[in-house]
Amino acid sequence: NAGVTQTPKFRVLKTGQSMTLLCAQDMNHEYMYWYRQDPGMGLRLIHYSVGEGTTAKGEVPDGYNVSRLKKQNFLLGLESAAPSQTSVYFCASSWTSGGIFPDTQYFGPGTRLTVL
Amino acid sequence: AQSVTQLDSQVPVFEEAPVELRCNYSSSVSVYLFWYVQYPNQGLQLLLKYLSGSTLVKGINGFEAEFNKSQTSFHLRKPSVHISDTAEYFCAVKKGGSEKLVFGKGTKLTVNP
């Protein structure tokens, strides 16, 4: 049981390049999330998904796209990277969300992205 | 929109001293409160959570937090810290019915020998 894994762990891009970050979970969770973490800013939600085939915008969605074609995977894409997207990206998943008893979000180890 | 304020960005303490990390949230009809810990170069892991019931919540590694509805606070405490508690701590809130977790900006706890 690997939990939540993220690929790659590190990446350096040049401005204008594109890339995809992969998040995978083996806990059969319905909900998945992408966050970015910047110094002094905490974690900010980029996009999230409440089930296979669904996605929704979070707090800071501009410049990113996502897809959830399979329940266990959640992809985050940068079509044209900018220096402002230099950050540490975390994926998380949970069994349920909202409702009366929200469940815990489980986090991956993060991807450190630098855009030059 | 929900917001979370962590009043201290950095807290230095000596080993075996008590510590309190403060967290206040904006009021809502019903909220669920969480504390996460992030050790250097790692992801976040749950320390404890308040969903309902007793306002004193005990978590892992000897931490506890108290939900105070009248003061809209959820402060984290530990009676005696260890060097290994050095990490960044995040308070988070989820409004009932929402899919989203809102995080505070974090408090860096440094435990010195």
Image (tube, rainbow, N blue to C red):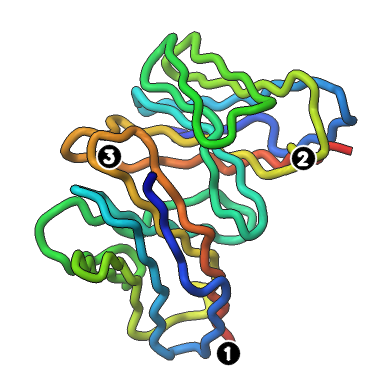
- Front-lying residue, A63 or B18: A63
- Front-lying residue, B21 or B25: B25
Residue B95 at what x, y percent from top left? 28, 43
Q: Quadrant of residue B65?
A: bottom left
Instruction: Report the Cα–Cα distance between label 3 and label 1.
Output: 37 Å
**With B47 as the anchor, is B54 left or right in this view?**
left
**With B79 as the anchor, is A102 left or right in this view?**
left
Q: Which residue is mark 2?
A: A84
> Which residue is at a point 80% across and 22% down the rendered structure image?
A80
**With B6 as the anchor, is B29 left or right in this view?**
left
**Looking at the picture, do discs 2 and 3 lie on one chain?**
yes
CB atoms of marks 1 and 2 within 8 Å: no
Give the SS element for disc 2.
Answer: helix
Comparing marks 3 and 1, which lies closer to the viewer? 3
What's under tag 3, amino acid-wise? Asp
- Residue A53 versus residue A101 in the image, above or below: above
Mark 2 Cα-neighbour bin, 10 Å: few <14, some 14–19, many ≥20: few
Q: Which residue is mark 1?
A: B113
Q: In the rendering, which numbered label is found on residue A103? A: 3
- N-terminal of the pair, mark 2 or mark 3, is 2
Mark 3 Cα-neighbour bin, 10 Å: few <14, some 14–19, many ≥20: some
What's under tag 2, amino acid-wise? Ser
On what subunit does the disc labeled 3 rest? Answer: A
On what subunit does the disc labeled 2 rest? Answer: A
Residue A84 at what x, y percent from top left? 77, 40
